[in-house]
Image (cartoon, rainbow, N blue to C red):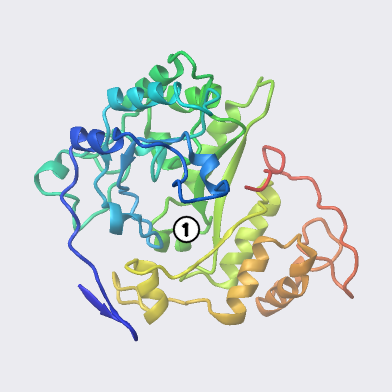
């Protein structure tokens, strides 16, 4: 496929044939130095957090409508063998600078490692349906990842193995009951990343994400595992504003959910069009190509307001939040009450945020 641009033409080649586990092993077991290129004269700060991380697989069948991973890695998960990953970890223990901590063992979604579908080998990913825990053909057992993590923990010289890339929460619900318990006991350094993105089912459906019920079920299970812990762990939710199909009404509903459940985060994502994705096609046309229906697309000022609503406590966003609440007819959320998102009247000092009514304390920002 060719896409013309003012100065050039972008050519999208057909996706490559997926690698077998042994082929992927050969690529990732090449003698990488895990250092910046010798041409650099100063340290590269972005390298340090991932220098001793391990990639376990490529590809993602999540098919999130705003994400381009499936475009360049494919929807078929290609996993390395456990033996290859263990050998890589053993080599790292002998490298200068390794201090016993592997900050991440994962991929696009860490708990897609080892998952497979028999149709992938014969016909590839289904063109008329999406992979997920509801599909009877998809093997959702996390036994292979549990075995991998157990073997990594047993390597001499490895003090801690973390899952830093996050997990798909609906898959974790379909996994063995001990999976999340093992993660919380051994592989969560303090924050576990999940990506509900939104809580309004109409919006998550357009995102191709699990709905609110799946996220709340996962949160409930996670909270049970926090009982009796000496050091509490927190969920780090990824949230998005301005996605096609999200109106001010849905954005305010998400802000209220954040208020009630203590999910306030310091960093969130504003939807950005990404070439080759479904959400970008909707953004450009205002039409859902899967249904032919017209879809509301936040733009300009409204997009700024939606972004501000996710950080309604930030005084710098006050005027934008006030504008959005008034435009949506939600002036009930303006004032001194504990249910209000922002105080009314002239700009002035904000009162301290009230305590969460949720099942846990406020989540620190990611």
- According to the picture, the residue beneath numbered tag 1 turns out to be 201
Q: Residue furthest left?
A: 122
Q: Circle 1 sits in a helix, a strand or a loop, which is it?
A: helix
Where is residue 225, by image quadrant? top right
Q: Residue at x 37, y 81 (%)?
A: 285
Q: Is residue 183 above or below residue 125?
A: above
Q: Is residue 149 above or below residue 251?
A: above
Q: Position of residue 308 (x, y in %)?
A: 67, 67
Lateral position of residue 253 relative to residue 37, left or right: right
Q: Residue at x 79, y 45 (%)?
A: 355
Give the class, few, some or many, for how many residues have Cα within 10 Å of label 1's Cα (few <14, many ≥20).
some
Q: Is residue 336 above or below residue 62?
A: below
Q: Position of residue 123 (x, y in %)?
A: 11, 49
Q: Residue furthest bottom?
A: 6
Quadrant of the rendering where the N terminus is positioned: bottom left
Q: Position of residue 286 (x, y in %)?
A: 40, 80
User: Who is closer to the viewer here, 342 or 328?
Assistant: 342
Where is residue 185, by image quadrant? top right
Where is residue 78, by image quadrant? top left
Lateral position of residue 146 relative to residue 215, left or right: left
Whether residue 143 appears in this view of the structure is no
Q: Residue at x 65, y 60 (%)?
A: 255
Q: Position of residue 40 (x, y in %)?
A: 50, 50
């Amino acid at each position: 496929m060719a896409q013309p641009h003012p100065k050039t033409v972008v050519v999208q080649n057909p996706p490559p044939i997926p690698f077998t586990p042994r082929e992927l092993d050969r690529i990732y077991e090449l003698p990488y130095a895990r250092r910046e290129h010798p041409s650099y004269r100063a340290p590269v700060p972005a390298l340090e957090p991932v220098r001793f991380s391990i990639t376990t697989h490529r590809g993602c069948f999540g098919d999130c409508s705003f994400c381009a991973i499936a475009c360049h890695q494919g929807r078929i998960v290609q996993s390395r063998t456990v033996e290859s990953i263990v050998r890589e970890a053993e080599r790292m223990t002998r490298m200068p600078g390794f201090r016993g901590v592997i900050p991440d063992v994962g991929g696009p979604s860490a708990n897609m490692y080892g998952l497979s579908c028999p149709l992938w080998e014969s016909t590839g990913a289904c063109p008329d349906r999406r992979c997920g825990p509801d599909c009877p053909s998809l093997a959702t057992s996390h036994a292979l990842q549990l075995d991998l993590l157990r073997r990594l923990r047993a390597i001499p010289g490895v003090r801690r193995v973390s899952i830093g890339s996050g997990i798909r929460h609906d898959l974790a619900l379909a996994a063995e009951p001990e999976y999340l318990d093992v993660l919380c006991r051994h592989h969560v350094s303090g924050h576990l990343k999940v990506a509900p993105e939104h809580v309004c089912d109409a919006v998550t459906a357009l995102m191709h994400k699990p709905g609110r019920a799946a996220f709340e079920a996962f949160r409930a299970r996670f909270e049970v595992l926090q009982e009796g812990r000496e050091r509490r762990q927190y969920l780090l939710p990824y949230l998005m504003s301005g996605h096609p199909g999200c109106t001010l009404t849905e954005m305010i509903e998400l802000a209220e959910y954040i208020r009630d459940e203590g999910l306030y985060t310091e960093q969130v994502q504003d939807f950005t069009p990404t070439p080759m994705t479904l959400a970008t096609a909707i953004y450009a046309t205002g039409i859902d190509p899967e249904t032919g229906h017209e879809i509301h697309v936040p733009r300009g000022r409204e997009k700024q307001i939606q972004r501000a609503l996710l950080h309604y406590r930030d005084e710098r966003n006050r005027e934008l939040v006030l504008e959005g609440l008034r435009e949506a007819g939600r002036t009930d959320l303006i004032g001194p009450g504990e249910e209000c998102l922002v105080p009314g009247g002239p700009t002035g000092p904000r009162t301290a945020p009230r305590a969460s009514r949720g099942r846990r304390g406020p989540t620190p920002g990611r």
